[in-house]
Image: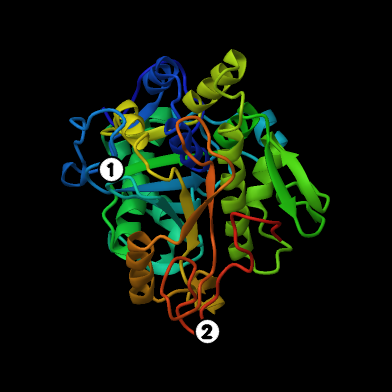
Amino acid sequence: MLLSSRGSRIGGRVTLGVVSTLVLAATGFAWTQLSKLDNGIVMADVIPPSAQIDDRGTPPGEPLKVAQNILLVGIDARTDAYGNPLPQNVLDALHAGSGDDGGDTTDTIILVHIPAGGAAATAISIPRDSYVDIAGGYGKHKINSAYSRGKNAAMSGLRARGLTGAQLEVAANEAGAKTAIQTVEKFTGLTINHYAAINLAGFDALSQAVGGVDVCLKAPVHDSYSGADFAAGPQTLSGAQALAFVRQRHGLLNGDLDRIARQQAFLSGMAKKVLSAGTFTDVSKLNSLVGAVQGAVVLDKGWDVLSFAQQLRGLTSGAIGFATIPVQSLSMQTPSDGDAVKVDPAQVRQFVRTAISTPAVQASGDDTTGGVKPVAATGTKPPSTGAVGTVGASDTKQPATSTAAGCVN
């Protein structure tokens, strides 16, 4: 079976919320609630056995014995985790057009490295338009098309096997996920051990479940494409507003780099909100959060979430540092894909190696239950250091804002 569900009907998939869920798991989260969460997650067979890690022998509360890499993606899909079309009223509320408008591209790509031994984690964003070699022999294209190319190529063979409707959609989604995973592995030089994804409706539900997320904008914005309509300054966003905040691309000074800055700032705010006082003692809030995650997450089939979360309790700092790969141009002309983001794969692989070996992380905020700090901000260091947030060359561009702190564009 290509995809299995442990529990009731699931509505979507996770990417942004998974990082916060991992942080949440490290706080002493009520284990009976976490067990309910594990029982309701949709699982997909997308990680090969050679990349799977079995660390179930690690005692609860002790850090991971083996480093792990998690690929988090946000998919511009108009179907739920079971391959069923999202209702038009839901798409309308999310400013997502019709069911035919989604291209099944991975518009958010974040690689999270969880080190062995309890050190701070590092989340590395990859611009969706990065021009790279797509795994499977598809040639050079934007990295966000890897999923859709793998999915579409699998369709004819799956139809020949007699698959139709939602069953066909689910099977093709697995093929797309595998192509996306292999492409990121080839690009970054890291082996992906776990996979998680979210679609439009899933992110909407998760952001509402936490009661909204605090963000800050440098200036007011109005974008009819995404539905973003915000004043300048601090504000709390949830549901369709939160989705518009992280999806907006038009009208931003640095395009996808500013979009990434928003995604990282939102993740930081969500982690703080999840870990805030009262979240774990309020039964209603706790149940809403568990229900939203159950309705949003799809994970790789070999991921034992309960065991993994217990091991995350051993993180010494409880922090997550955010970084973005270096890019050389935001408007490189391509033969068939329009403007793309120019990247140097060798430079990116070196950046990733440095980022996961010397995370420049300082935890911010007060300690939470269990001595875990809520979030970390990644600062930009001088070019000579080669650490997280470093500009690797004179023509290499980075987000204008230190993304996990302060206001963003």
Location of the C terminus by quadrant is bottom right
Identify the residue at horizontal 32%, vertical 42% (top origin). 194
Q: Is residue 59 left or right of residue 381?
A: left
Which amino acid is tagged 1?
Answer: Gly
Q: Is residue 326 left or right of residue 303?
A: right
Decide if residue 45 is in sight here: yes
Numbered badge on residue 57: none
Q: Counting residues from the N terminus, which is met first, the one under dot 2 or under dot 1?
A: 1
Residue 224: x and y, percent? 77, 51
Residue 193: x and y, percent? 27, 46
Which amino acid is tagged 2?
Answer: Asp
Q: Quadrant of residue 171?
A: top left
Identify the residue at horizontal 36%, vertical 65% (top origin). 352
Classify mark 2: helix, strand or loop: loop
> Would you place residue 390 above or below residue 79 in this image?
below
Front in this rendered view, residue 31 or 346: 31
- For marks 2 and 1, give the one nearer the viewer: 2
Whole-angstrom CA distance, mark 2 to mark 1, is 44 Å
Residue 178: x and y, percent? 31, 47
Front in this rendered view, residue 361 or 253: 361
| Residue at the spot of label 2 | 395
Disc 1 residue crowd, few under 14, some 14–19, many 20+, Cα 10 Å? few
Identify the residue at horizontal 22%, vertical 46% (top origin). 66
Q: Quadrant of residue 359?
A: bottom left
Numbered badge on residue 157: 1
